[in-house]
Image: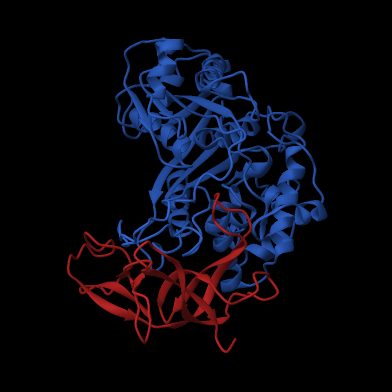
Amino acid sequence: MASASEEVWVLGIHMTKFGKHPDLDTVDLASQAVQGALADGGVTMKDMGVIGAGNLMGGALPIGQVVQKQLGQTGIPVYNVSNACATGATALRVAVMSIKAGETDMGLAFGVEKLAGAGLLAGGSRKSDNNEWTPSGRYGAVAGVDGRIGTETMPGVFAQIGMEYGHRYGGTSFELFAQISEKNHAHSTLNPLAAYTKKMTLEEIMNDVMIAYPNTRPMCSANCDGAAAAVVVSGSKLKTLSLEQQKRAVKISASILTTDPWEEACQVLPDVNELTRRAVAQAYEQAGVGPQDLNLVELHDCFATAELVHYDNLGLCERGGAADFFKSGATWRDGSTPVNVSGGLESKGHPIAATGIANVWEVTTHLRGEGGDRQIEGAKVGLTHVIGLGSACGVHILEKSAA
Amino acid sequence: MAQQIPLVDYLVLGDDPHLVANECTSCGARYFDRRNACARCEGTDFKQVDVPTTGEVRAFTIVSFAAPGIPVPFVAAVVDCEGTSVRANLMNVTPDPEHVTTGMKVRLATEVIGTDDNGTEAVGFGFEPLGG
């Protein structure tokens, strides 16, 4: 049985094609991902001791049990989790923690979302303006405040986060943010599972529909359908499996979840910085690696403005140096720290609950040397990062098997 | 003059409109919503304090695409009012990046957002350029 000092490994992992799947429902997509992960790991539902499951927008059904009823009702505990855009990473951590706690030696995590065609996912919390003004809620508002007291929309919130970074440290511009998007769209052309695989010029990006300055439409994460699933296993159990399974297994050297600690202004504009800094500091310590050791990073580019601040938050550059770091070319796939070689949320897509496992799939694929045309040669260590606004930050560090 | 009511209860109307915050008496953390406790120090005692009516734009966005029924474009911003951060729209400014910049100095302003069946006006707030 596993123990608290037990290593945890990714044994099998799968991501569906992201995009439009009009003929598949949430259960179909989740099933594809789960069956793919089980087959990839050479195991079955009977081998699983726990399931962490995530689906944010699908309603009240317990998605874990609904999927069990299609793929295998074995009676094991299911944890249906909800943690905004960090839902997938949280589901994965549930399986990891169960192994660390010694409750099981193998577990499954999956996240699934149907979002193709969805518009803005927040904002508009305006009640219909009354015939008689009546204060209500925790601010005593007599009418809706979205659009009257700032914005609740995600593109607008993350635009301000990028603008604030520029105000504090300088070096940013509309063009610079658009160049980040240009990079991710270029990367996506090599990823057959991405929702959008079209290269876009800087001019096309800057002249596209403005959503919330400085984020135009291609600088925003793409709403789409998709699912991802992972099978994780304890180190001692892995030793009993075949050499082939051991060779393809990828070590989870760090699995961290944080929330936003109190800071001035954090309840005025959500803070995505301090919790990321804390998460990654813990992750580097747990894994015994530093940012200079990372061969690739999949970070939460829900908007181009967000990617910039996370170069800094993840310690990929010196404090305040994110703009210069990007301008150096470091984060392109042929740079010193390739970031979002999958295309990122802006072009690969962002089926919310799937994202925190899909990024682990991407890094795992490179560490196994199975990346095909977009393989980062010789990749040994990679990092994944997600932010769920509200806020939660999930960070995983993955390492290639020595077997 | 018509009877008036503030859009939110942390806006105080009258001759000198201003915002008020709930300040934790233990640690000084400030909040605009009704509080159960202080998220910084867990204190449960608060006093109401006036927030300075001038400040500096620390972050902004120009929202061109919003939920149905919300007029666009508008400028959403975070204004640093001498150490207290406030979320607000910018008013009386052309909503384009040539006219709005981080670091610009602004002051509180109010505007009527509508009138109910009793003839009562609801008054909202924003910040406008200083000397503009």
Residue B68 pos. (x, y %): 55, 49
Residue A118 pos. (x, y %): 58, 37
Instruction: Give the residue at x 34% y 59%.
Output: A132
Q: Does residue A23 sit above or below B89 in this rendering?
A: above
Which of the 4 image quarters holds residue A365? top right
Q: Is residue A315 in view from this perspective?
A: no
Residue A211 pos. (x, y %): 65, 54
Q: Does residue A80 sit above or below B47 in this rendering?
A: above
In screen coordinates, is A57 left or right of A77?
A: right
Q: Is residue B20 in view from this perspective?
A: yes
Which of the 4 image quarters holds residue A165? bottom right
Residue A232 pos. (x, y %): 45, 25
Nearest the eye: A86 or A254: A86
The colour applied to the residues of chain B in this rendering is red
Instruction: Give the residue at x 52% y 81%.
Output: B106
Which of the 4 image quarters holds residue A296? top right
The colour applied to the residues of chain A in this rendering is blue
From this viewpoint, which residue is outermost toward the bottom? B131
Number of numbered discs on residues: 0
Instruction: Give the residue at x 49% y 55%.
Output: A152
In screen coordinates, is A113 left or right of B72?
A: left
Nearest the eye: A297 or A116: A116
Q: What quarter of the picture does the C terminus of chain B occupy?
A: bottom right
Q: Does residue B102 sit above or below A384 in this rendering?
A: below
Q: What quarter of the picture does the N terminus of chain B occupy?
A: bottom left
Instruction: Give the residue at x 34% y 83%.
Output: B14
